[in-house]
Image (tube, rainbow, N blue to C red):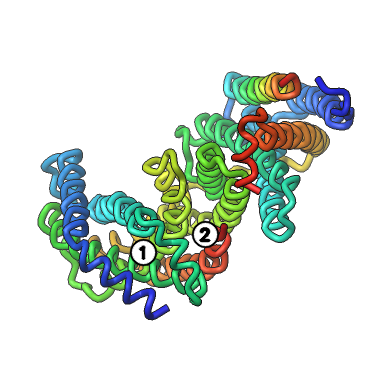
């Protein structure tokens, strides 16, 4: 590693955004599946 | 909805707590923590990456515990928990691989850096996806539970071997060392996010296990004209 | 267990046309891999070991998928389980038979690799040892998963590789590295450590799969 890596906020945002997106998507899918199964 | 299905609050409370903590921890990690000396701002990925890694490993270990418990006890609640833990583990491992790739690109200029931990996670991810596929293709609940428990144990036993093989392979190729550990100056966002994802994971697993139990109930209580088939299963 | 092994070997001898077909499949994949690289002698030599193991791995799914075929076709597995032998003996008989068949296949693919990739090695004994250890690593979990997937009604073709391939990543890595060191030269004497890794994998999976097999076939 030579010198400080400058910038790279795009990578940081995409990492956090991806995580948030998939966690939310999973939560939504879980709620939908649970509701479908309960109403059967 | 039948009245005897209670609506326990615990998983929802855990999820809410997890979201609040995750927002707080990420805020601290993104805006308050100082940039790291060598990595600069890219190092902030670590505040979500490392907690995800710990929890992915935890979810998969819990799946192993459930698998062993099912094989010894034969209780289908353990099967439901195993299915839940595998699915949430797959989600976290997938996120981990994505974050790892995003971390590797600016740091080393490649998307995949053959870090032993990351590679082991990827192998485990595919192994667990295989187990989820197996569960889809087996209709008999007893076989499905037993076989996926067996496959979970076998897949988990692979972890140390994959880790060592990739470590050796790396040392022979003299690639860069694995990602630097988080700077000691700011542990708080790391811990907050670790507990946040732990709460989220626990809530997810509880809800997903309930879904699995409900599905099994419906599977075992089909419309009256199929009752003969159930008799054969039991 | 000896009886179970003898039965398996007899069965494999009777269906040797199938083994030849698997060999032709493996040789064809080696040919295809060489076309993917093109006529570049040094690149071919560089990748020879990896392609040999990939070809062996792909062919092994064919062998393994067929290994419970006879039992399934005539519902003979239930019959075997009724015999006073333990399921463990059946498993080890099957796994050893698969291992021998895969090892022979691997050894048969070596001359093809040498011709196509110009990848000769003077250390034939070590190469055969690597092939034995590597195919043992494929056969132990492969036989167990084959017992599962051949009992499923749907998705037979897909499930076996899906379950098996992630698991044997370390086998592929270690065997391909060790073979590559034999072909390209091993200045730092690293082959032995890869062999130890393969042996550790084999020891773990031959015992673990034997322990778990009776849960897979029990009703």
On the question of residue C146 being in view, the answer is yes
Q: What's the chain of the residue with tag 2?
A: C
Q: Is residue C181 above or below residue B52?
A: below
The picture places residue B20, in percent across and down from the top left corner, at 84, 23
Which quadrant holds residue B218?
A: top right
Q: Nearer the viewer, residue B33 or A21?
A: A21
Image quadrant of residue B54? top right
- Which quadrant would residue B28 be assigned to in this image? top right
The one nearer the camera, C155 or B177, is: C155
Q: Which residue is mark 1?
A: C134
* Kind of element beneath mark 2: helix
Percent across and percent down for residue B85 are 68, 41
Residue B116 vertical placement versus B101 (above, below): below
Would residue B34 be found to the left or right of residue B42 on screen? right
Q: Residue at x 16, y 47 (%)?
A: C28
Residue C112 is left or right of residue B97, and the answer is left
Q: Residue at x 77, y 29 (%)?
A: B33
Q: Label 1 lies in what chain?
A: C
Q: Is residue B46 visible?
A: no
Residue at the spot of label 2? C217
Tag 2–tag 1 contact (CB < 8 Å): no
| Residue drawn at (46%, 74%) of the image | C89
Depth check: B150 or C131 in front? B150
The number of discs equals 2
- What quarter of the picture does the N terminus of chain B occupy? top right
Q: Which of disc 1 and disc 2 is earlier in sequence?
A: 1
Question: Label 1 neighbourhood size at 10 Å, few (<14), some (14-19), many (20+)?
Answer: many
Horizontal and vertical percent for residue B105? 50, 31
Q: Nearer the viewer, mark 2 or mark 1?
A: 2
| Distance CA(mark 2)–CA(mark 1) | 26 Å
Mark 2 crowd level (few <14, some 14–19, many ≥20, 10 Å Cα): some
């Amino acid at each position: 590693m030579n010198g400080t890596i400058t910038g790279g906020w795009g990578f940081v945002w995409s990492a956090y955004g991806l995580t948030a997106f998939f966690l939310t998507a999973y939560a939504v899918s879980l709620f939908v599946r649970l509701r479908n199964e309960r109403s059967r | 909805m039948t009245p005897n299905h209670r609506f326990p609050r615990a998983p929802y409370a855990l999820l809410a707590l997890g979201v609040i903590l995750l927002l707080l921890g990420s805020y601290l990690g993104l805006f308050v923590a100082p940039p790291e000396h060598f990595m600069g701002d890219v190092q902030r990925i670590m505040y979500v990456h490392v907690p995800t890694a710990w929890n992915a490993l935890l979810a998969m270990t819990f799946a192993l515990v459930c698998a062993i418990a099912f094989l010894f006890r034969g209780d289908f609640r353990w099967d439901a928990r195993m299915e839940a833990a595998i699915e949430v583990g797959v989600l976290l491992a997938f996120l981990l691989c994505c974050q790892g790739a995003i971390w590797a690109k600016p740091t080393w200029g490649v998307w995949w850096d053959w870090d032993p931990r990351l590679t082991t996670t990827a192998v485990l991810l595919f192994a667990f996806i295989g187990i989820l596929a197996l569960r889809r293709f087996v209709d008999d609940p007893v076989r499905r539970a037993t076989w996926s428990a067996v496959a979970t144990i076998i897949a988990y036993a692979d972890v140390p071997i994959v880790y060592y093989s990739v470590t050796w392979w790396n040392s022979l190729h003299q690639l860069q060392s694995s990602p630097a550990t988080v700077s000691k100056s700011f542990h708080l966002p790391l811990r907050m996010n670790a507990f946040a994802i732990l709460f989220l994971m626990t809530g997810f697993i509880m809800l997903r296990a309930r879904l699995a139990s409900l599905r099994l109930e419906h599977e075992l209580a089909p419309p009256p004209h199929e009752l003969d088939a159930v008799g054969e299963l039991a | 267990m000896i009886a179970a092994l003898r039965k398996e070997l007899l069965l494999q001898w009777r269906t040797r046309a199938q083994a030849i077909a698997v060999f032709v499949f493996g040789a064809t994949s080696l040919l295809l891999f060489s076309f993917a690289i093109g006529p570049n002698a040094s690149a071919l030599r560089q990748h020879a070991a990896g392609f040999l193991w990939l070809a062996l791995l792909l062919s092994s799914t064919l062998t393994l998928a067929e290994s419970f075929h006879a039992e399934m076709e005539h519902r003979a597995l239930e019959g075997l389980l009724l015999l006073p032998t333990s399921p463990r003996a059946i498993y080890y008989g099957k796994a050893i038979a698969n291992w021998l068949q895969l090892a022979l296949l691997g050894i048969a693919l070596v001359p093809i690799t040498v011709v196509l990739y110009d990848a000769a090695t003077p250390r034939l004994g070590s190469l055969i040892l690597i092939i034995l250890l590597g195919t043992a690593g494929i056969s132990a979990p492969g036989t167990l998963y084959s017992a599962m997937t051949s009992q499923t009604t749907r998705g037979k073709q897909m499930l076996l590789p899906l379950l098996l391939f992630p698991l044997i990543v370390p086998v592929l890595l270690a065997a391909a590295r060790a073979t590559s060191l034999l072909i390209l030269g091993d200045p730092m004497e690293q082959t032995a450590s890869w062999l130890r890794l393969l042996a550790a994998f084999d020891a773990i999976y031959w015992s673990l799969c034997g322990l778990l097999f009776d849960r897979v076939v029990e009703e």
